[in-house]
Image (cartoon, rainbow, N blue to C red):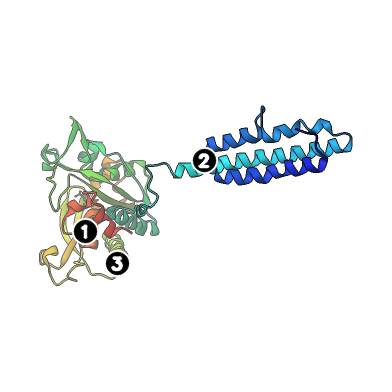
Amino acid sequence: MNELTLQAFEHFVGRFGTEVDTRLREARTAEDVEAIRVEYLGRANGKLTDYQKQIPTFSGEERKLAGQQFNAVKKLIEGRLAETLTELSRVTRLSVPDVDLTMPSRSQFRGAEHPVTVVIEEIVEIFREIGFTVATGPEAETEWYNFTALNFPPDHPAMDMHDTMYLAEDVVLRTHTSPVQIRSLQAGPPPIRVVIPGNVYRLDPFDASHAPMFAQIEGLAVDEGISFVDLKATLTHFATRFFGATRTRFRPSYFPFTEPSAEMDVECRLCKGSGCPACKGTGWMEILGSGMVHPNVLDAAGVDSEKYTGWAFGMGPARIALQRYGIPDIRVLYDSEMRFLGQVAR
Ligand code: DAH
């Protein structure tokens, strides 16, 4: 290369900046970028590198200006090369051959809470508002917690292997949440006000109205001077809060762990009390069992039955969910059928 005037040097070197810019716009791959780098900055015959050799031919102030110009352009080119590489790496990922960018995107999938979970949470919340706390207990229980302490006589049919899943000689999968009453009483002392959600197990066939595993919610209130009035008032309050204005009724019943015992019905949601297949023509739906805690139960748990009284209830949120959503078959709650669950999603 002939010796140049400073003006010519600045002109040619300056042009490389724009030239490289234009070239890089056409680069499609990292290899294209590398080729451009070698062409301009390559050590052997790089277009810009060649001009570096010109710098010593200037003297004094001119050499300094030429050096500055050279470095500025070199820096500019290096910067653009790096930028282009980053841009390309982003674009290349999108344009790999087997991704079809014109395909319609998948519709959004939004999860939702299961209807039984929704019902459990609402029930728990209503009791929370009036001072109850939540308690839980193990699903594998000894016979003592599941039956004996709850005043089941030793030969009660519920203890039969046909109804109850035994894990070992003395250990069962709890058949109800009532054993957590005993655990709560033992953790005492009264006053006790707890609700106990949890899963329970029975050797039932899986049909329209039975499942071998289902949720229950237990309630327990024990204090001095608690009476059947508290039971009725609290459970009626619950029914009104949960179902809205509704008629309720209590029917005498029997459970080993309560005396007296009562089942609570609410007016059938589907026919408003006039009678339909869902309520077997009665106009009423049974929603829970309840009663005054049997003194034997308090004593078994070490709570003084002379001093304290209490009431308890147990209900099945799945049955209540069926009622609320007008579902005729309990199995749909366990099918994981997304089209159904999507319909009732909150
Ligand atoms: N444990 C009973 C069941 O599974 C339900 C029940 C009834 C619970 C009355 C109670 C109660 O606490 O007082 O069928």
Tell me the residue that label 3 is attached to. 240
Mark 3 crowdedness (10 Å alpha carbons): few <14, some 14-19, many ≥20 = some
Q: Which badge, 2 or 1, comes first in the chain's sequence?
A: 2
**Quadrant (top left, top right, bottom left, bottom right) of the C terminus:** bottom left
Q: Which badge, 3 or 2, comes first in the chain's sequence?
A: 2
Question: Most extreme residue toward the right, as rendered?
Answer: 60
Mark 1 crowdedness (10 Å alpha carbons): few <14, some 14-19, many ≥20 = some
- x and y percentages locating residue 178 in the rendered image: 25, 46
Tell me the residue that label 1 is attached to. 322
Give 313 or 223, whichever is nearer the viewer: 313
73, above or below 311, in the image: above
Q: Could you tell me how far apart the alpha carbons at marks 2 and 1 are, in whole angstroms?
A: 54 Å
Question: Most extreme residue toward the top, as rendered?
Answer: 44
Q: Residue 89 carries which label?
A: 2
Give 31 or 279, whichever is nearer the viewer: 31
The answer as to whether callout 1 falls within 8 Å of ligand 1 is: no
Residue kind at label 1, given as amino acid type: Leu
- x and y percentages locating residue 161 in the rendered image: 12, 36
Q: Could you tell me how far apart the alpha carbons at marks 3 and 2 are, in whole angstroms?
A: 62 Å
Q: Which mark is residue 195?
A: none
Pointers 2 and 1 in contact (C-beta within 8 Å): no
Residue kind at label 2, given as amino acid type: Ser
Is label 3 in a helix, a strand or a loop? helix
Q: Could you tell me how far apart the alpha carbons at marks 3 and 1 are, in whole angstroms?
A: 18 Å
225, above or below 100, in the image: below
The answer as to whether callout 3 falls within 8 Å of ligand 1 is: no
- x and y percentages locating residue 195 in the rendered image: 32, 51
